[in-house]
Amino acid sequence: MKTLPQWIHRSATLAAGVIRRLDPYYRDSFDRYFRPSIESLAQTIIRLRLKDHGLDLGQELIRDDEEQVTTEIADTMNRFLIRHYRNTGKTAERAGNTKTYGLLKASFTIDDKLPRELKVGLFKKKQTFPAYVRFAGPGPLVTRDVDNNGILSIGIKVMGVPGPKLLDDEKSTHDFLGISSPTFTTPDIYENLKLQQAIEKDAPVWYFINPLDSHYLDAVMQGLYARTHANPLELTYNSCVPYRYGNNRAVKYIFRPRISQKSKVGRLTENYLREAMVETLAQHPVTFDLYIQIQTDPVSMPLENASVVWSERSSPPIRVATIRIPRQTFDSPAQLAFARNLTFNPWHALAEHKPLGNQNRARKYIYQATSRMRQGINKEQHIEPTGDEVFV
């Protein structure tokens, strides 16, 4: 028998499905005329709740119970994987950023005109690395694109990067992660645990609207960016969480496509987003620019709260690299299977770009634990790619 939260989630999901099909008729105008003011109001309220903890720029605030909460999140997500995939005959997928739209070969080039103070770590000098770029949907299950395509994700695995990494299961990779919203789904790991527990109970919508513990502002922020998209190659992606940049700077990453205008939403087939990417990359290459946004105020630009948008007026984005995706064919079963087996983790990184904030600190363990569970269910081995892979 379904519980009240499950019924509410089911009803909200059905309503969202209807809205997704109506999106192409009105959403561009809504985003142009209404989204900025609604986002500004939501962010104003969120900032009014921020506290001054007396931190310096780039300084983290680590709580004693973080390790316990991190373990609980990983255990909850792994129980979800076991329930949905172990002994079911299904291939286990990621518990988040689940459906792969495509894994693309790319090049990652450091800008040659960076200011001296920004020539740090990976960005020390102009050079080009091979890379894989994975575009994916939210999850936690693989569904038809129109049913679950609100907030998309990007994962970039740069290869051939010399130097010791913060996570030693891969020697030569440096990973970047982002989503198509400027804020993360939850502000911190404590609320993220509640969301994962709601997902385990098949009622994630209840996490946002539970009147006894609501998260309406996060629901508003996610809702402003959750829509029926036309093409994953045309979206801006944000890291949402901060990273070290050198000794004392903290930054967020922004990945912006070089496009003159977005295309219209096509026919809503089961895999229409992948089909849109196939069509685009059969005709021309795609370029993204990687920007950093430097923390300039420890209160209004916190490291520990991923619900806060960092003001571009206070900290204008600075371009540091370019990702070029050449024309290619990428939708073979072998390449999609390879994408599923790759592990993206922000701790695949040089020490100069250490992940910051409680959600990033938790990711180190959570992503490893859930990757091992997924690969164990599928009887697959961890793979560190080189970029020389050939897919038939």
Image (spheres, rainbow, N blue to C red):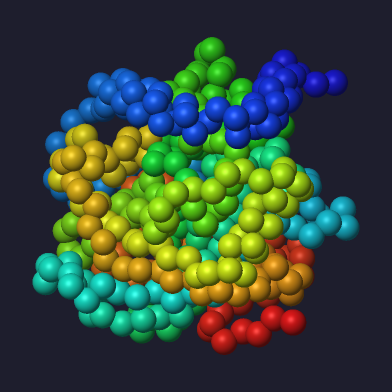
Left or right of 340 on screen, residue 249: left
Residue 66 showing in the rendered view: no
The answer to which quarter of the image holds residue 162 is bottom left
Q: Quadrant of the N terminus?
A: top right
In the foreground, 288 or 220 = 288
The answer to which quarter of the image holds residue 108 is bottom left
In the foreground, 109 or 329 = 329
At 49% from the left edge and 34% from the top edge, which residue is drawn? 28
Residue 155's x, y, as percent?
50, 61
In the foreground, 382 or 79 = 382
At 83% from the left edge and 56% from the top edge, which residue is drawn? 90
Count of numbered labels shown in the rendering: 0
Residue 236's x, y, as percent?
42, 50
Residue 198's x, y, as percent?
63, 31
Above or below — where is 258 with respect to 54?
below
At 18% from the left edge and 46% from the top edge, which residue is drawn? 315
Left or right of 365 on screen, residue 299: left
Q: Quadrant of the C terminus?
A: bottom right
Left or right of 318 on screen, residue 325: right
Residue 224's x, y, as percent?
47, 30
At 51% from the left edge and 74% from the top edge, which residue is drawn? 326
